[in-house]
Image: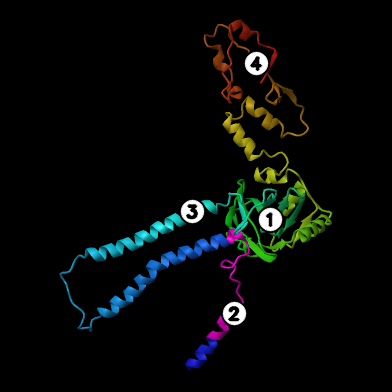
Amino acid sequence: MNRLRILTIVPLFLALAACDMVVLNPSGDVAAQQRDLLVMSTWLMLLIIVPVMALTVIFAWRYRHNNRKARYEPDWHHSMRLELVIWSAPLLIIICLGALTWLGTHLLDPYRPLDRLAPGQDLPEDVQPLQVNVVALDWKWLFIYPEQGIATVNELAVPVNRPVALRITASSVMNSLYIPHFAGMIYAMPGMETKLHGVLNQTGESEGFSSNYSGAGFSGMRFKVHSLEQGEFDRWLAGARDSQETLTRDLYLELAKPSEREPVRHFSAVDAGLFSAILGMCVEPGKMCTHDMMALDERGGLGLAGVYNVARLAEGQPRAVFGADQAHVIGLCTAPAAQQVDDPVPFSRVDRSPLRGAGLPNPSFKSRSLFADASSTSPQ
């Protein structure tokens, strides 16, 4: 019976033999440093965990109820030596973990550009990182190569031993980009940009995916990662340019609609301002970008300073430019005349709300007669 139980367990170990220990055996230098940090932290914690677990078993066995040889000391209450051991060992472990974490947090900052390609191999001065813009869609990944002018869906190719700089955002909900061979995971959030730097030191094919649940198609939100020699990477670029399909804003809006298990797709050209519009959440025609909204708020809201930002979004409207601030005249209004010149406070009937904002002063006049004769048009 025991042999039968053992035989039923053997297939489970055979299944585990096919698992790829990618986290502990990555092919990228940044991921390898993160692996080392994980391993060292685990060993430091085991220095205190293993003795505590062993002592728990030893004490339970030594002071069991039927052990008459164990000393029974009900009045014992304190031991300085024991206190030193109990508190000094964890304190030393915490100090070591704190120093290790502080160094690792700064050296492995995802926003920090790389200064080496591998252990003992510094980054050459003439090597520039490959720029890739990443967009998490529902439920697929879009990769834009701004320097090469191409884009792909669910496929990322990079040259081996060349730094890669990723600019990451999302179209609707929050996701998390994770390429275990490349570097650690980092969030992709709509309207925000995160960055990730890394390198792949071995040729081959690996997989990336979203590690943050984002809806029904989350499980299929995976993509292939190709680490290629420079010649093979150039041939991959040439193949992507043969697609003869341009990623325009209209096509992006169709692509951004939810879909599951999207096949690999290449675009030979990309709208130059597409990623900035995705980041500003203003791909749709006539929609104001978030950076324009923030600029308006910083300068006081929808006053004179905000006329340009609003008017430039309206297509087909006449625009008169004046001043050095790129402002536009969007309309003219008639100044309301006072019904009674003898009114002691004639300005109370004037609606000044359109003139407020950006620190603009309230309208003022030198005399009532000037206000009474204001029947001509004036700029709003």
Which residue is depicted at the point 82% across and 55% down? 241
- The kind of residue tagged 1 is Arg
Quarter occupied by residue 65: bottom left
Q: Earlier in the sequence, mark 2 or mark 3?
A: 2
Q: Earlier in the sequence, mark 3 or mark 4?
A: 3
**Are there few (<14), some (14-19), or many (20+) residues within 10 Å of tag 4?**
some
Is residue 180 shown left or right of residue 230?
left
Q: Position of residue 25 (x, y in %)?
A: 59, 68
Residue 17 lies in the magenta-colored region: yes
| Relative depth, front residue between 85 and 380 | 85
Report, in whole angstroms, how far the alpha carbon at label 2 lies from the one at label 4. Answer: 83 Å
Check disc 2 and report the residue beneath it.
Answer: 15
Which residue is depicted at the point 48% across and 94% down? 1
Report, in whole angstroms, how far the alpha carbon at label 2 lies from the one at label 1. Answer: 35 Å
Which residue is depicted at the point 58% across and 13% down? 364
Is residue 209 shown left or right of residue 312?
left
Which residue is depicted at the point 65% across and 16% down? 335
**Are there few (<14), some (14-19), or many (20+) residues within 10 Å of tag 3?**
few
Check disc 4 and report the residue beneath it.
Answer: 335
In this view, the mark in front (3 or 4): 3
